[in-house]
Image (spheres, rainbow, N blue to C red):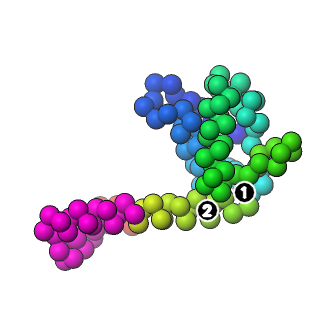
Amino acid sequence: MIISIDLDDNVPVYRQIINQIQNLLIEGKLGPKDPLPPIRQLATDLELNPNTVAKAYSILESERLIFSAGRKGTFVAADALDNLKNDLERNSKRQIKSIMNELQCNGYDKKAFKKMIDELINELRW
């Protein structure tokens, strides 16, 4: 598993680890029950404090993407990709709803919102 850290990036280091593991899941480079490096090993490889890696792993575990099997190690959860997609959908809906509320408060109606969405979809070429 290849993870690299950019200390000049504004994204916190623990979040960079999380993002890269999520991307490896999405790209299929990490799959169900695949092992992750031990915290100390990854911290040593990346020249980080083990607490930073532990924080990333803790968040990934709370998001149901990985699980710890004690001394056996840490592994990708069987339903990690589904959990990741569900979280993405839930967070996206929350953000879209917030934007819709803001537009509505500023006088936009459904027709104007639908027009805006259609224009954006066309720009993305879905």
Q: Looking at the figure, which quarter contains the C terminus?
A: bottom left
Question: Which of marks 2 and 1 precedes in the sequence?
Answer: 1
Secondary-structure class at tag 1 = loop
Q: Which residues are magenta?
A: 94-121
Residue under label 1, please give it. 77
Q: Is residue 105 in the magenta section?
A: yes
Q: Is residue 44 in the magenta section?
A: no
Q: Which residue sits at x=51%, y=25%?
A: 7
The crowd level at tag 2 (other Cα within 10 Å; few <14, some 14-19, many 20+) is some
The crowd level at tag 1 (other Cα within 10 Å; few <14, some 14-19, many 20+) is many
Q: Is residue 23 toward the left or the right of residue 67 in the image? A: left
Q: Which residue sits at x=23%, y=62%?
A: 102
Percent position of residue 100, x then y: 27, 67
Separation (CA) of disc 1 from disc 2: 9 Å
Looking at the rendered structure, the kind of residue marked 1 is: Ala
Q: Is residue 25 visible?
A: no
Q: Residue furthest left?
A: 107
User: In the image, is residue 105 above or below residue 74?
Assistant: below
Do the residues bearing badges 1 and 2 touch, measured as CB atoms within 8 Å?
yes
Residue 103 location, quadrant: bottom left
The circle drawn on residue 83 is 2
Q: Which secondary structure dominates the residues rendered in magenta?
A: helix
Q: Looking at the figure, which quarter contains the N terminus?
A: top right
Q: Is residue 104 visible?
A: yes
Looking at the rendered structure, the kind of residue marked 2 is: Asn
User: In the image, is residue 88 above or below residue 23?
Assistant: below
Percent position of residue 107, x then y: 13, 68
User: In the image, is residue 77 above or below residue 110?
Assistant: above
Secondary-structure class at tag 2 = helix
